[in-house]
Amino acid sequence: MSHIQHRDLAGGRWWQLSLAEQLGHVGSEISRALRWTSRNPDVARGAVYRALELLDLTLADPRQRQSPARLREIARAREVVADFFAGPNQYGSTGPSIQKYFDAYAVAARRPALTQT
């Protein structure tokens, strides 16, 4: 990635979002990339770069650093996305499978928080 798209988020706004919200936003970029792959590869490539950048910001989130398991999950998601869009697809991913993974986070982010008793 040569051009930072989300410079304003890097200052901390991104870190105010929940993990589900962060990964839901990544899913939006993945959806955009999948939609544009056959119509306009340049637009699709830009969406992939933005998704990877958002994943990098999520990996840099100090809250995620508290959990090695979370870091591994986020890093693996990034690896799978990069492998699917720019690599040999060694994981055998499909567009729908990647979209389904990130859609689950978008759905979770929209659920109202459970009240604690």
Image (cartoon, rainbow, N blue to C red):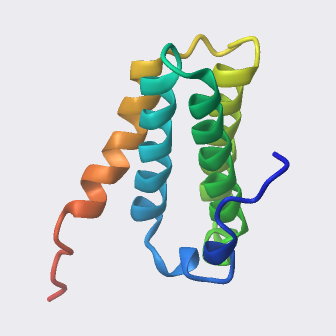
Q: Can the viewer see residue 117 in this picture?
A: yes
- Quick one: 109 or 50, which is closer to the camera? 50
Q: How many marks?
A: 0
Q: Residue at x 39, y 20 (%)?
A: 96
Rendered position, 3 above or below 47: below
Q: Residue at x 42, y 25 (%)?
A: 35
Q: Is residue 96 above or below residue 56?
A: above
Residue 13: name its quadrant: bottom right
Assign the C terminus to one quadrant of the image. bottom left
Quarter of the view holding residue 83: top right
16 or 10: nearer the viewer: 10
Q: Is residue 69 visible?
A: no
User: Is residue 63 positioned above or below 80 on the image?
Assistant: below
Residue 47 is situated, as x and y percent measured from the top left of the image, at 57, 40
5 over 47 or under it: above or below = below
Residue 90, percent from left and from top: 71, 12
**Quadrant location of the N terminus in the rendered image:** top right
